[in-house]
Image (cartoon, rainbow, N blue to C red):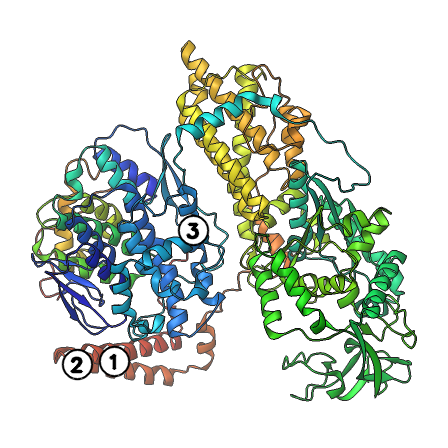
């Protein structure tokens, strides 16, 4: 998904009225937010955090110092790891790590839904749709989290729903 | 809180500095772990530094840890900081880890290390200088400064990797490095061993792979909008409103152009191309084209400008070429001089003079300088051992001898160098030397030669450089080359050669000799001027009034920066010496070098046959001008830049602005009622225009071109945001707004046409004709943005400026000119294996696969060591692959390894 399209999705899920214009820059097509006054902003997570503030939903950036740092950490993870030139192996490691991280968590920060969940959901969507049933089961915690976020009101929009099967099929897969 | 660090992990620097600064250190426990220890339970790959919080949570990102310390001390997050941190993670880190890896682990030096990060460093420098703020995110030091400083410190603490020309970066870095928390962090991590302290950590890391292929990038630097003060806006508006009235009268054309007292007199030379070859794109961008941009710019500034060049015609190479083609040297020179002149005419190079060095004036002036040097004791005689062919009755220049290489025994080594082992050879050392012309064996004879006594002139030269260099626009590479020559000490240089084709030496006993190009080629500029006007001395013996700019590729720096100045200083005749020596780096072709002999690359005469207009060539060559670092010509990139920058950005904007005037306002520029947004735009354009001037005054040609594209981008954005095509159908107020936007846009287009003139003269003239831009506005560029197309001005017919370049067109050109083609896909290995594998081998392999499969299963069942299992699995996969090959099955190719 192009970054500008993703930001449009985010705008909509934040309830912002349309009106921001985006362009893309360089080989990696980094999004640039065009503003009529003041300096423009560059970078997916930078613009996303800006939009959250624009929508007066600062709580999505975390409320405590710890939460704020954790949100930014996962946003950085999103643009450096998820968006990198991923080989199949990289994707596997990424899902494995995330799966083990989410073992005792509902959301990336623990108990609160944040921008990190939204952007990681958008970023991972292209990988998750390609997973086999067996793989989805292998990364059970990721699947649980992903399924939860895709049903979060207003987030998924036109993206395809990924189907997760509730009963386990491969009981001895590990 | 507990912080895990590892010896030499670069991430510790910003983290410790941030911790120290935020005074959070009291509650902080620091543990040192090995570089491969997995501290974070959920991460597969080891990562340090890591901060374990009291809640049990882990922060494993260096920036996030720093951010956390700052948040604890009450700091609030802001957009600009976020932007810097995102940039640091996505752009700076990949470049920097490559650079540090090359430096620390692979022991590379210089440009190999600096190359990958140069663009990032320039970006920081520009941001700092554009905002004119001492720190990245404002007036005070903040999170962004600490994170970037910490990342850069290991590299930049070595002054060799902190480029001199990046002044703003320099002072930012010094300021931060001198602060106490930073100093302490630096001491803790680097332990005064410099960057090598990172070695224990970095050598355990894999080679940063994602960075491959990003080193030579022709990508544009991103632009940021500067913040504007009310004053700047007011000034821009005032200047705009003055309009055409503020243009000075055009200066009348002079012929010949001569210096005028009290004016800025600019003398521009481009290195004289050697006559015996057709210049390639690298030669063209290196001197004539670069100098042309500056000459055109200089004329737009109404400076009194003389731009000269010519062919360098004397020397061995011409004699060789003449022999090859069966012509006399004079005929060769005539032939190639015409070829050169045609190429430059096609490229629209605006020489005032394009002369040649084989003229009586050249002889007269060279001999005069020589006589003056001789009488002042700066020339001496010495004997040189040389090969002489008795049959041809002459001494053989290096290129006229072939023989067996004394080092490697290669049979066809040349007199100066062996093509096989690459060693430099002294012609008399060749075994079995042969005269290239008659194939007879030459004999060693001694020959008398004249030497220019450079050591005697060294002091004068240094004095002159001491006065000239500070504050001048000599490029850093030129300064560097001169400095290293002076550091090694100057040596006497032989200035004569045993040749016929050259300027005769006016001295008894030297009747058979001529001056070596070392001595007389640079005098060509003077003699070419003398052929243009008999008042040449007003340019060349007038250092007080004349500003001399000399353009060349870096290999020419010693001649222009040392030898000619020494001759001129020694001649004591008040010669004008170079004020600004502008040297480019090298331009490569696709991934290699231009090579006439291998038919690789585009040469001047071929560019015309590609069907691509000269201005497009000019644009692309200037866009990738090797300014500050080597760059590469790439067909794909040329297509991309044409289609994105010219067609979609510049052409699109100028065409739309003009079309709106024609379509909505009957070709008549509408009334403009400026809103605060428009005023801000005026100020932004003015700022960018001034930036363009600053850059071109410093001869930073490539960067100034970016300013043009930036303004056009602003323009596109302005049209896009304001949507005049919708408003024109709306209320009275909407229609007025549409008028203002259109009027402002078409005026920006007019400004762009003038700014573009040095780069793309034909396109510039086309735009100006389409817009019917009044004559004085076409030829003068002030530092302010003026309204040159006032309301009521009638424009002409508007039509598109650029054509799209198509993929197959470019692909066929690439094929034609060679180099960089996609290699033929490797033949499937199946074919090869099929031929040899019989049923027996297949059986053997099948057995082995079964056996290995069992081993793996057993190990897994025993829950054996991971690495051991992995090794056995690898063996299994390899066997399976061999089996598949033997059976002729297609290989399963790993998916997901998409090419970028």
Q: Kindly check if marks 3 and 1 are in contact, taking CB atoms under 8 A apart as contact.
A: no
From the viewer's perspective, is the residue at label 3 or at label 1 nearer?
3
Q: What element carries label 2?
A: helix
Give SS at disc 3. Answer: helix
Of the pair B104 and B304, the residue shown nearer to us: B304
Using residue B616 as the reference point, say whether residue B527 is left or right of it. right
Q: Mark 2 points at which residue?
A: B859
Determine which residue is flagged by label 3.
B168
Of badges 3 and 2, nearer the viewer stands: 3
At 59% from the left and 17% from the top, the residue drawn is B667
Would residue A103 appear left or right of B309 to someone viewing this image? left
Same-chain status of marks 3 and 2: yes
Tag 2–tag 1 contact (CB < 8 Å): yes
Disc 3 chain ID: B
The residue where tag 1 is placed is B872
Q: Can see residue B260?
A: yes
* Same chain check for tags 2 and 1: yes
Vertical relation: B442 (above or below) B501:
below
Say left or right for B200 vs B412. left
Check the image and report above or below for B557 versus B384.
Answer: above
Q: Nearer the viewer, residue B772 or B779?
A: B779
**Label whose residue precedes the other's in the sequence (3 or 1):** 3
Q: Mark 2 or mark 3, which is nearer the start of the sequence? A: 3
Which chain does tag 1 point to? Answer: B
- The outermost residue toward the top is B732
Query: Quick one: B541 or B729, which is closer to the camera?
Result: B541
The reply to the same-chain question for discs 3 and 1 is yes
Q: In which quarter of the image is the N terminus of chain B?
A: bottom left
Which corner quadrant holds the C terminus of chain B? bottom left
Looking at the image, which residue is at 30% across and 81% down? B846
**Location of residue A106 in the rendering, given as x and y in whole percent from the top left corner:** 9, 49
């Amino acid at each position: 998904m192009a970054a500008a399209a993703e930001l449009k999705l985010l705008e909509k899920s934040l309830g912002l009225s349309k009106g921001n214009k985006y362009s893309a820059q360089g080989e990696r097509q980094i999004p640039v937010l065009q503003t009529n006054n003041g300096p423009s902003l560059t970078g997916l997570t930078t613009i996303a955090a800006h939009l959250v503030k624009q929508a007066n939903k600062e709580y999505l950036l975390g409320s405590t110092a710890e939460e704020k740092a954790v949100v930014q950490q996962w946003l950085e993870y999103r643009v450096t790891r998820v968006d990198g030139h991923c080989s199949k192996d990289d994707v596997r490691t990424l899902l494995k790590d995330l799966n083990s991280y989410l073992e005792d968590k509902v959301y990336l920060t623990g108990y609160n839904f944040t921008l990190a969940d939204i952007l990681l959901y958008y970023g991972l969507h292209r990988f998750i749709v390609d997973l086999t049933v067996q793989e989805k089961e292998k990364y059970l915690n990721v699947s649980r989290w992903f399924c939860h976020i895709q049903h979060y009101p207003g987030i998924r929009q036109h993206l395809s729903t990924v189907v997760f099967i509730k009963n386990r099929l491969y009981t001895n897969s590990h | 809180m507990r912080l895990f660090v590892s010896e030499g992990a670069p991430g510790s620097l910003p983290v410790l500095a941030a911790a120290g600064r935020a005074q959070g250190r009291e509650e902080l426990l620091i543990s040192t772990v090995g570089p491969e220890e997995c501290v974070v339970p959920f991460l597969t790959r080891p990562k340090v530094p890591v901060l374990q919080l009291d809640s049990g949570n882990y922060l494993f990102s260096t920036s996030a840890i720093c951010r956390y310390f700052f948040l604890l001390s009450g700091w609030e997050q802001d957009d600009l900081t976020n932007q810097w941190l995102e940039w640091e993670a996505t752009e700076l880190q990949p470049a920097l880890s490559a650079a540090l890896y090359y430096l620390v682990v692979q022991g590379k030096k210089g440009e190999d290390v600096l190359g990958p990060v140069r663009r990032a460093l320039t970006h920081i420098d520009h941001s700092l200088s554009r905002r004119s703020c001492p720190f990245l995110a404002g007036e005070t030091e903040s999170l962004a400064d600490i994170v970037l400083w910490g990342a850069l410190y290991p590299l930049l603490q070595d002054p060799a990797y902190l480029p001199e020309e990046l002044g703003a970066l320099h002072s930012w870095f010094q300021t931060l490095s001198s602060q106490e928390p930073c100093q302490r962090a630096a001491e803790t991590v680097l332990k005064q061993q410099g960057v090598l302290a990172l070695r224990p950590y970095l050598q355990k890391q894999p080679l940063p792979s994602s960075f491959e292929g990003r080193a030579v990038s022709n990508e544009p630097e991103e632009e940021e909008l500067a913040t504007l003060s009310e004053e700047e806006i007011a000034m821009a508006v005032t200047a705009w409103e003055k309009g055409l009235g503020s243009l000075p009268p055009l200066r009348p054309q002079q012929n010949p152009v001569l210096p005028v007292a009290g004016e800025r007199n600019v003398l521009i030379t481009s290195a004289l191309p050697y006559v015996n070859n057709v210049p390639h794109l690298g030669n063209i961008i290196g001197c004539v084209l670069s100098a042309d941009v500056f000459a055109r710019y200089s004329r737009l500034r109404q400076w009194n400008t003389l731009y000269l060049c010519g062919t360098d015609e004397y020397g061995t190479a011409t004699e060789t070429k003449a022999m090859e083609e069966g012509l006399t040297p004079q005929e060769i020179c005539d032939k190639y001089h015409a070829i050169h002149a045609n190429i430059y005419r096609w490229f629209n190079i605006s020489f005032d003079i394009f002369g040649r060095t084989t003229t009586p004036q050249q002889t007269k002036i060279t001999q005069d300088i020589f006589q003056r040097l001789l009488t002042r004791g700066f020339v001496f005689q010495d004997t040189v051992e040389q090969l002489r062919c008795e049959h041809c009755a002459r001494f053989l220049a290096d290129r006229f001898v072939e023989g067996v290489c004394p080092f490697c025994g290669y049979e066809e080594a040349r007199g100066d160098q062996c093509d096989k082992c690459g060693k430099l050879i002294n012609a008399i050392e060749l075994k079995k030397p042969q005269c290239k012309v008659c194939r007879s064996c030459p004999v060693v004879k001694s020959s008398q030669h004249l030497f220019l006594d450079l050591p005697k002139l060294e002091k004068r030269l240094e004095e002159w450089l001491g006065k000239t260099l500070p504050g001048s626009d000599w490029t850093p590479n030129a300064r560097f080359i001169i400095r290293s020559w002076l550091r090694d000490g100057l040596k006497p240089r032989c200035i004569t050669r045993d040749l016929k084709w050259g300027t005769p030496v006016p001295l008894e006993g030297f009747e058979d000799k001529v001056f070596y190009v070392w001595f007389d080629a640079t005098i060509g500029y003077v003699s070419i001027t003398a052929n243009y006007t008999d008042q040449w001395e007003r340019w060349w013996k007038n250092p007080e009034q004349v500003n001399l700019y000399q353009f060349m590729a870096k290999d020419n720096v010693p001649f222009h920066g040392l030898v000619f100045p020494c001759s001129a200083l020694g001649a004591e005749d008040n010669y004008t010496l170079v004020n600004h020596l502008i040297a480019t780096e090298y331009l490569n072709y696709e991934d290699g070098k231009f090579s006439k002999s291998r038919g690789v690359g585009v040469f001047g005469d071929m560019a015309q046959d590609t069907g691509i207009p000269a201005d497009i060539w000019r644009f692309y060559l200037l866009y990738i001008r090797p300014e500050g670092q080597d760059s590469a010509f790439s067909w794909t990139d040329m297509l991309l830049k044409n289609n994105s920058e010219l067609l979609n950005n510049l052409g699109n904007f100028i065409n739309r602005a003009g079309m709106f005037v024609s379509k909505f306002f009957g070709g008549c520029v509408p009334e403009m009622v400026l809103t605060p947004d428009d005023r801000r735009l005026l100020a932004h354009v003015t700022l960018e225009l001034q930036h363009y001037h600053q850059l071109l005054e410093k001869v930073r040609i490539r960067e100034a071109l970016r300013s043009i594209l930036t303004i056009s981008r602003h323009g596109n954005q302005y049209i896009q945001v304001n949507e005049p095509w919708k408003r024109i159908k709306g209320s009275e107020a909407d229609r007025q707004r549409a008028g203002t936007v259109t009027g402002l846009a078409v005026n920006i287009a007019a400004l762009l046409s003038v700014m573009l003139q040095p780069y793309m003269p034909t396109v510039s003239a086309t735009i100006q004709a389409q817009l019917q831009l009044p004559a004085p506005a076409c030829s003068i560029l002030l530092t302010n943005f003026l309204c040159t197309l006032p309301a009521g001005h009638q424009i002409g017919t508007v039509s598109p400026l650029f054509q799209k370049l198509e993929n197959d067109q470019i692909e066929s050109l690439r094929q034609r000119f060679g180099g960089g083609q996609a290699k033929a896909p490797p033949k499937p290995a199946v074919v090869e294996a099929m031929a040899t594998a019989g049923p027996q081998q297949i059986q053997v392999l099948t057995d082995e696969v079964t056996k290995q499969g069992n081993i793996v299963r057993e190990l897994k069942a025993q829950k054996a060591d991971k690495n051991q299992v992995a090794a056995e699995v690898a063996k299994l996969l390899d066997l399976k692959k061999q089996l598949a090959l033997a059976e002729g099955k297609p290989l399963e190719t790993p998916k997901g390894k998409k090419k970028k």
